[in-house]
Amino acid sequence: RGRGGHGVLKMCWSSWSDLLAVACTDHVVRVWDVRTRALAREFRGHTAQITAIAFSHDTQMVLSSSMDGTLRHWHLSSGLCF
């Protein structure tokens, strides 16, 4: 279980930064800075289990898909979903 007691479904490491994206059982994507061990961002919006997670090539976006039928593009700096 991750911090806060939420189970982990998927993880994705950014090869260009010290970020780790984690898809949790509460349908939230959490991005951690592994160097500082701090939570960098939480993305909420999925209403069902997250099925896949990935960083964009430039590490500016996190992409996630879910059993709710959505594909979400999360912007790391602003926290907005496109």
Image: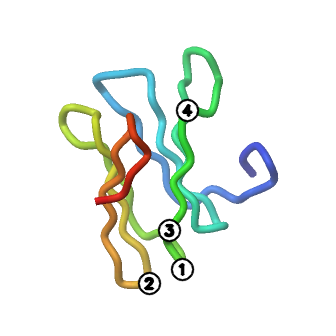
Q: Which mark is residue 40?
A: 4
Residue at image mark 3: 45
Task: Give the numbered dot on residue 68.
Answer: 2
Task: Kindly indicate whether the residue at mark 4 contacts the one at mark 1 (C-beta within 8 angstroms).
Answer: no
Q: Percent x, y for residue 63?
A: 32, 55
- Point out residue 42 in the picture as x, y percentages from the top left corner: 56, 48
Earlier residue among tags 3 and 4? 4
Q: Is residue 10 above or below residue 13?
A: below
Write the residue at 53% across / 25% down: 33
Q: Secondary structure at mark 1?
A: loop
> Left or right of 58: which side holds 14?
right
Q: Which secondary structure lies at badge 4?
A: strand
Task: Assign the C terminus to one quadrant of the image.
Answer: bottom left
Q: Which one is earlier in the sequence, the residue at label 3 or at label 2?
A: 3
How far apart are labels 4 and 2 at the CA level? 25 Å
As measured in the structure, the alpha-carbon distance from the residue carrying label 3 to the one carrying label 2 is 10 Å
Residue 6 lies, in percent from the top left, at 73, 57
